[in-house]
Image (cartoon, rainbow, N blue to C red):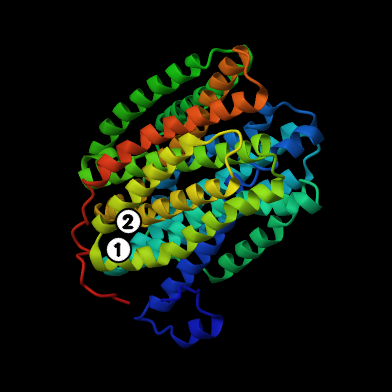
Amino acid sequence: MTTDAPTLADFEATAPVEDHSARNKLVIGLLLVSAFVVILNETIMGVALPHLMADLDITASAAQWLTTAFMLTMAVVIPITGFLLQRLNTRPVFILAMSLFSAGTLISALAPGFGVLVIGRIVQASGTAIMMPLLMTTVMNLVPPESRGKTMGNISIVISVAPAIGPTISGLILSVLEWRWMFILVLPIALAALALGASRIKNVTTPTDAPIDILSVILSAIGFGGLVYGLSGLGEAAIHAPLVSPFIPLAVGVAAIVIFVLRQLQLQKQDRALLDLRTLAIPAFTISAAMMSILMMAMFGAFILLPIYLQNVLGLTTLQTGLLLLPGGLIMGLCAPTVGSLFDKYGPVPLVIPGAILTSAALWGLTFIQVDTPFWALLIAHLGLSVGLALMFTPLFTVSLGSLPPNLYSHGSAVIGTTQQVAGAAGTALFVAILTLQSAGLAAGGADVLTATTGGIKAAFLCGAIISLLAVVAAFFIRKPAGGAPGMGHGH
């Protein structure tokens, strides 16, 4: 059941022309390691923001852009990757993704000030955005349906554990070194992954001559960008009067997305769509993708709220906060391969329904926090949330992409990637906005800082708990896609 990438010796010993399984294992192994490195960076900044605010002399709402700009870039670049993956071969796309990521890491490490640091994060994010759909599409093309669960289990380790341990790693680094080391330490790993991949990754897809529609690219950038930017602005508007009302970018974003969708529906008749929305005509895909969006909202929301509560209310240090959140991240990682194997055996239903109920229960539990809630109670809630998410991520990824015909794999993973980034950014923005509005209201009514902050965090968790009920309902509609019926055994 191990999933280690084979060594060079294994690779050369087991590579006759007709058997591609060793080559495929190596390609997937390299993509998994590289994806882990790039995804880790999405949440590594969270714990570091107080340090950066002091070092760079910036406000909290400005510092938040180091994470928001990253998500915005992902939401804008991911739709284009569906096109890239059709036009180019596996190896050049990988080299492009890791080169961008490494360049962004270098810019961030050397950044003289806040502006350059944001640019570095944007370059990093554009590499990260290409990496995820590349990994998913490659797996769907190489792994037979009956053993996809196990491979998707390894992918969900990358997608769920890397963001979960990001705060712990940055907490550890910041307890002994300054913030630049978060980038300096990642750079050699990124460069090693780039060098190894460039020399070892073989082309495993057949490029087609897909045309790109420039208007679609512009519309998707304005649409998804405006949506995420507007949602991020809602939280800031609660603290101080914004330069532009957040509802303006929200309205522009929604309008651009509507035009974008209409344009795709026109273009897909000639197979020229940037994001082929025929994926959404398949109910299994749409329900799974919608559930994953809800989970990303809950997950990113909790990643933002828990550290604020642990540090600002309970008075824990960044390192203590990171360590408290670590067991949840590790549990997600340990559960993922088992969940994948169970999925291959029994299908999604016995995993997704308990997972949705557990996730919802953990979020409802967090609505009861007080100023003096013991930290072990939060640890239990975070562990419950992590197990619930682990039970759902792998089956949902596998069901969503497994229900598509192969010609839509690259579009399917781009649709999932885009909706997840937008949902993650939206969840973060929504929860922070509720937290800010509620605490401001309580403080105005005479509550002290701790009571006001706790009240704000409770209100935000309540919102998350209510949203999680949608996932519980949706869980009952998830079905195993045809093609990977349970009981087919592993076809390695």
Q: Position of residue 231 (x, y in %)?
A: 50, 25
Tell me, yes or no, if residue 144 can be seen here: yes
Tell me, for residue 146, which label it has, or none.
Answer: none
Depth check, front residue: 269 or 313: 313
Query: Which is nearer the N-term, disc 1 or disc 2?
Result: 1
Label 2 neighbour load within 10 Å: few <14, some 14-19, many 20+: many
Q: Is residue 110 above or below residue 72?
A: below
- The amino acid marked with disc number 2 is Pro
State how far apart marks 1 and 2 are (Cα). Answer: 6 Å
Residue 195 appears in which quarter of the rendering? bottom right
Which residue is painted at 47% across and 58% down in the image? Answer: 332
Q: Is residue 235 above or below residue 338?
A: above
Residue 252 appears in which quarter of the rendering? top left
Q: Left or right: 356 with respect to 112?
A: left
- The amino acid marked with disc number 1 is Phe
Tell me, yes or no, if residue 217 can be seen here: no
Q: Which residue is mark 1?
A: 343
Of helix, strand and loop, which one carries label 1?
helix
Label 1 neighbour load within 10 Å: few <14, some 14-19, many 20+: many
Which residue is painted at 55% across and 42% down in the image? Answer: 303
Quadrant where the C terminus is found in the figure: bottom left
Which residue is painted at 27% across and 56% down in the image? Answer: 402
Q: Position of residue 271 (x, y in %)?
A: 28, 42
Q: Which residue is mark 2?
A: 395
Quadrant where the N terminus is found in the figure: bottom left
Depth check, front residue: 314 or 156: 314
Q: Left or right: 455 with respect to 217?
A: right
The answer to whether the residues at label 1 and label 2 have Cβ atoms under 8 Å apart is yes
Q: Is residue 225 above or below residue 153?
A: above
Depth check, front residue: 277 or 149: 149
